[in-house]
Image (cartoon, rainbow, N blue to C red):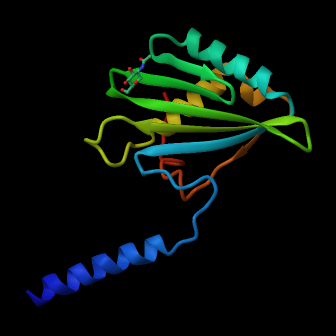
Amino acid sequence: MKTLLLASALFAGLFVSLTAVPVPDPAPAPYHAFCKTMLFAGPCTDIKTMLVTQILASSPEYTLVSVVPGFVKANHTSPKTPEGESIIISLNPTILTGGCRMSALSTSNGFTSLFDGGQNYCNLYNLVSASGLMKEPGFMEITNEWACLGYGLATCS
Ligand SMILES: *[C@@H]1O[C@H](CO)[C@@H](O)[C@H](O)[C@H]1NC(C)=O
């Protein structure tokens, strides 16, 4: 009983210390999610066109959900992940450089596995690499390790 109390005290302490960590930008995603921020020298309209073209070309694995000013939404499903993942991409012009800042978030729809083994990372990586966006002028990748736990453990196929 004493051990149990101690264990729950430690557990509670863990959560207290976790919530005390400063909130990074963008806000931390649940750990069955992956996010990535990329910078481009070109305008967001070009980046958006390339993304949408690639999503449509990658049917049926990727499905275009909606395209609205500043956002592209898509779904990803594969035999490995039948419940699928939701992908939300935001595109914001960078004022000073006239470029584009793109933030992409992939979230698992299923809650069967808390840790996705890098699936959400691969969804974004495969989409971005197939679209040719990594070859765009001024491409830069910013990874927030706190929000992006799948990074480095992923083996993308
Ligand atoms: C995308 O996935 C969500 C969540 O599973 C689902 O509700 C929605 O109907 C899907 N949209 C399309 C266009 O497949």
Q: Is residue 5 left or right of residue 53?
A: left
Q: Residue furthest bottom?
A: 2
Q: Which quadrant of the figure contains the N terminus?
A: bottom left
Q: Is residue 6 left or right of residue 134?
A: left
Image height of 51 relative to 29, above or below: above
Q: Residue at x 45, y 31 (%)?
A: 86
Q: Residue at x 25, y 41 (%)?
A: 112
Locate residue 12, reporting x and y percent.
Answer: 30, 77
Q: Residue furthest front?
A: 69
Locate residue 119, reporting x and y percent.
Answer: 44, 36
Image height of 35 relative to 122, above or below: below
**Foreground pick, 85 / 65:** 65
Q: Residue at x 22, y 79 (%)?
A: 8
Q: Residue furthest left?
A: 1
Locate residue 28, reporting x and y percent.
Answer: 52, 55
Which quarter of the frame holds ligand 1? Answer: top left
Total label count?
0
Locate residue 36, reporting x and y percent.
Answer: 62, 43
**Foreground pick, 44 / 154:** 44
Does residue 138 show up?
no
Does residue 23 show up?
yes
Where, by quadrant of the figure, is residue 132 drawn? top right
Where, by quadrant of the figure, is residue 91 drawn? top right
